[in-house]
Amino acid sequence: MSNPVISSAARVHSIDPLLMLVSFWRHRELILTLVRREVIGRYRGSVLGILWSFFNPLFMLAVYTFVFTVVFQARWSGGGGTKAEFAMLLFVGLILFNLFAECVNRAPSLILGHANYVKKVVFPLEILVPVTLGSAVFHALVSLAVWLVAYLLLFGLPHATLLLLPIVLVPLLLLTLGLSWLLASLGVFLRDVSQVVVILTTTLMFLSPIFYPVSAIPEGYRGFLALNPLAPAIEQARDILFWGRGIDWGSYGMGLIASALIAWLGFAWFQRTRRGFADVL
Amino acid sequence: MASIQLEKVSVSFPVYSASNRSLKNRLIQSATGGQIRADTVSQRISVVEALQDIDLDLRSGDRLGLVGHNGAGKTTLLRVLGGIYEPNCGRVSVEGSTVPLFDIALGMDQESTGYENIVLRGLFLGLTRRQIKARMDEIAEFTELGDFLNLPIRTYSAGMQMRLAFAVSTSVVPDILLLDEGIGAGDAAFLDKARARLKHFTEQVSIIVLSSHSNDLVRNMCNKAVLMEHGRIAQYGPTEEVLDAYEAKHGTYNKDRSKLGGDEAIAGAGIGRL
């Protein structure tokens, strides 16, 4: 049996990291259109429409704040101890976590749900992941707007370090992309993946410093937290948004490199395994 | 110049049980450059040989019809040409922009308006937004849907949706067009217009490969034909020769069939979806 020789631009699934960017750029219009359709499509037909993007995080925030500050009597260690402060700090963590979880939870069924794109057309399948990310980012931005309004009302003008937010988000976005590509591919071959992922993200919600600061974790366990890729992103976001501290560029740089590597590995995995999609769908 | 060349192309599918998917094999394959097949890794997995030793050479101007029984490998061959399936061995060389029109409505969204769907479908066909905008008026006019284009397409009848999909899908002329059972185009009143457009459209395409069970459709559109049997090319030559041989082999069945669907197929002149 000789190796198949294929010469057609559409068929070469290179794992070149540059291709990630090229693919983004080449399909930017398709990505934007699909993101728009997702964002609008989710609430199309409902009476309140896009307002649900506001209400959803707001309700969750109210519930969490009630449970933790009133029922559990939790206070943010290192803070002033007010409920408002707790809510604002919790919200930041929640926004970032939801961004991550929304993408990762949907990833395993992404290709499965678009079997037609695999079997009936030559479709740039790799952009399905950025499309999910795009709609998740949109919802995160809506939540952030809510957060900002709340901050203005409760605490006054926000810190100038707020402007660093896009920089802080980059590693988290890269990480999410990489994991989503990996899971999207795995989900095609192994249908159990989506079940496992839901359990893992729920676990991760409580193991990430969302309801508590990193400093609240006993020394002995902090080493494990270093393994949690969400922890630094959440802590940094709280630093710049709430505490008005700058970025620690050393640890940020490490996180950026690590997450860029994860993004590329996920992409490479996706590109390597995508030939098999049509066989099993 | 568009061209298609296949040399000794074979495609086989491992058949997996639901609990045993091919990830392991896929990984072993990518690690070894595709040499180890699923069947050598595990004897429990049976393999369907969908295509075996296919040789094909098409140049600009060729219109190839694929005929044969269900499961003979027609659709698999089309998918190989479209780059959807990778051959297990052999050489595939396709030059020119290729559009597989297996489902002309693919990518359309029920909740979006007609105009939005023109953009969406156009992007799926590989157009840029600017190119679509430039064609928008022409497409909108051709569909005759008027103000309906501002409504979500779930409010359309099946025929209206078909018009829209047809109009967009035939607005870009690729070098190579792959068709499975022709293109449907809505009601009779629309048919004349659609036929003219389709004729104009297909004339501009360099190479067409059409898979069909309607021998009349193949006769109308193709100058060459391939008879597929069990994943192999049983006969290759001018349309008439191949179809005569095919009809002689499976005489009564096909005669009945072409009588039943014949009128529409001829009226459609390459449009009817039977």
Image (tube, coloured by chain):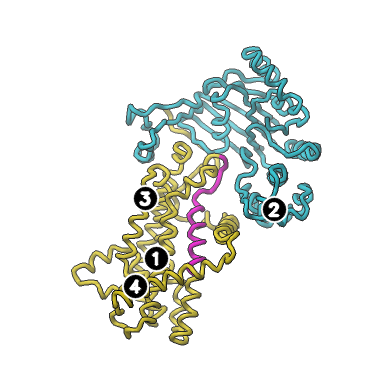
Q: CA distance from mark 3 to mark 2?
A: 37 Å
> Residues at badges 3 and 4 in contact (C-beta under 8 Å)?
no
> Residues at badges 3 and 2 in contact (C-beta under 8 Å)?
no
Say whether mark 1 and mark 3 are on the same chain: yes
Instruction: Report the mark closest to the observer, 3 or 4.
Output: 4
Q: Which chain is cyan?
A: B
Q: Which chain is yellow?
A: A
Determine which quarter of the picture holds residue B64: top right
Q: Residue furthest bottom?
A: A156
> Residues at badges 4 and 2 in contact (C-beta under 8 Å)?
no
Q: Secondary structure at mark 2?
A: helix
Q: CA distance from mark 3 to mark 1?
A: 19 Å
Ranked by sequence position, the earlier of labels 3 and 1 is 1
Q: Which residue is mark 2?
A: B114
Ranked by sequence position, the earlier of labels 3 and 4 is 4
Q: Is residue B184 magenta?
A: no
Q: Which residue is mark 3?
A: A195
Q: Which of the chains bears the disc numbered 4?
A: A
Task: Tell me the tag on residue A97.
Answer: 1
Instruction: Report the mark closest to the observer, 4 or 2.
Output: 4
Q: Where B15 falls versus A50 (above or below)?
A: above
The magenta segment: A120-141
Q: Secondary structure at mark 1?
A: helix
In-image side of B113 versus A228 (left or right): right
Q: Which of the chains bears the disc numbered 1?
A: A
Say whether mark 1 and mark 2 are on the same chain: no
Residue density around tag 4, few if under 14, some if 14–19, many if 20 or more, within 10 Å: few
Q: Which of the chains bears the disc numbered 3?
A: A
